Structure formats: C-alpha cells, structure tokens
Image (cartoon, rainbow, N blue to C red):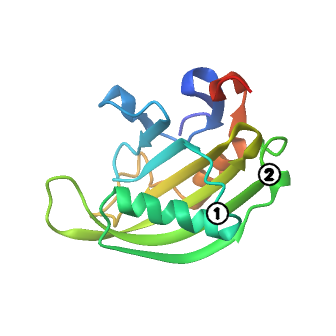
Amino acid sequence: MEPTRNFPLFGGAFSAILPPGAIDVSDLRPVPDNQEVFCHPVTDQSLIVELLEMQAHVRGEAAARYHFEDVGRVQGARTVHVLSVQPLCLENLSLRGCCQDAWFLSGKQQVAKENQQVAKDVTLHQALLRLPQYQTDLLLTFNQPPSHGPENLSCPPWSLGNFEQLVTSLTLHDPNIFGPQ
C-alpha cells in the first residue's frame, strides 16, 4: 500500500489525500478544467472532484439532491434513486473555514457505459461542500459500479473510508482559482 500523501489538485490550488493506487485520468484522456478525475487500477471505481457554479436557488438537502440528479441527467441515467442524505460536520473538514454547508448523499443510478446498451446500477456517494464566498459548489463523487469477479488483492477496492478521507482532507491553498473576488 502506498504511503498516505496530499496530492495536488487543480494545479496545486487544492490538495487532498487520495486512496491507494489512484490513477489520474487526465493522463489517459482529456478531462474538463473544472474536474479532477481518478480511477482505480483494477476495479471500475472512480473519484471525481468538481468545481461548479453555486446553485443558490437550492439550499440544504435539496442542493445535494439537485447535484445528484444533475449528474444522472448528464450521464444519461435511466433511473436515479437517492438512498440517504445527511449533513456533514463542518468541524471535520479541512475546508471548514470557507465551507458554509456540507452534505453527504448516497444513491443509485442506472447508467449504461459508453458504447454499451445494458444499463447497470451504479452506487454513487457524493459530498457537496458549499463555498458561497467563492460562488462555488464543490462536488466530490465516488462511483462504485458492480464488481466483476475476484478483486486483485494487490490493490483492494476503495472503501467509503477512502472517500471520507478524500473529503475531509481536501484543502484550499490558492483562492485565486476562483478568479478575482
């Protein structure tokens, strides 16, 4: 297992602790500038960190649901089902100084992968960190598609604990990423 380390995100404007074996998808294919995407070396699991325009028209739990449903719409999900939404304790976040509101959502979406007809139920866990002074909704997503066969024990599947560590360790180093304030 790799040692735990802070990984620079968005050109060093942020950093976070990534799970073992995380592969930077931007080394494999183009990724939008507002996203950092990582995939597991063996499973189909992925992690996405997105800087989004704040959706001020939705608040609290409704904001978490809004972003979950929006991800489903963008991915062409056939069904979207929220399992739970809970507030996150701001005191546990490295971003507690600039995060006004934080939510954790778990849900399922029925999505077909590119070039495939069969849709599969994918479990998604999302953390929404709202940064109003930067007019930004920071959305972190952990995609857990169904697993196929025995896992390679040299790199076990990521857990919810790995995702929680990513969320709580996310740190802002350069607020200029948000443009002039």
Q: Is residue 11 found left or right of 43 in the rendered image? A: right
- Mark 2 — residue? 100
Image: 60 above or below 92? below
Which amino acid type corresponds to the residue marked 2 in the rendered image?
Answer: Gln
Closer to us: 113 or 147: 113
- Mark 1 — residue? 58
**Looking at the image, is mark 1 or mark 2 earlier in the sequence?**
1
Residue 154 pos. (x, y %): 41, 45
Q: Is residue 115 found left or right of 156 in the rendered image? A: left
Q: Residue at x 72, y 57 (%)?
A: 102
Closer to us: 12 or 43: 12
Q: How far apart are the alpha carbons under marks 1 and 2?
A: 14 Å
Residue 161 pos. (x, y %): 62, 57
Q: Which mark is residue 169?
A: none
Note whether residue 22 is visible.
no
Which amino acid type corresponds to the residue marked 1 in the rendered image?
Answer: Val
Quadrant of the snapshot with the C terminus: top right
Can you tell which of label 1 and label 2 is closer to the viewer? 1
Q: Is residue 131 found left or right of 162 in the rendered image? A: right
Q: Residue at x 52, y 41 (%)?
A: 20
Note whether residue 69 is visible.
yes
Dot 2 crowding, Cα within 10 Å, few <14, some 14–19, many 20+: few
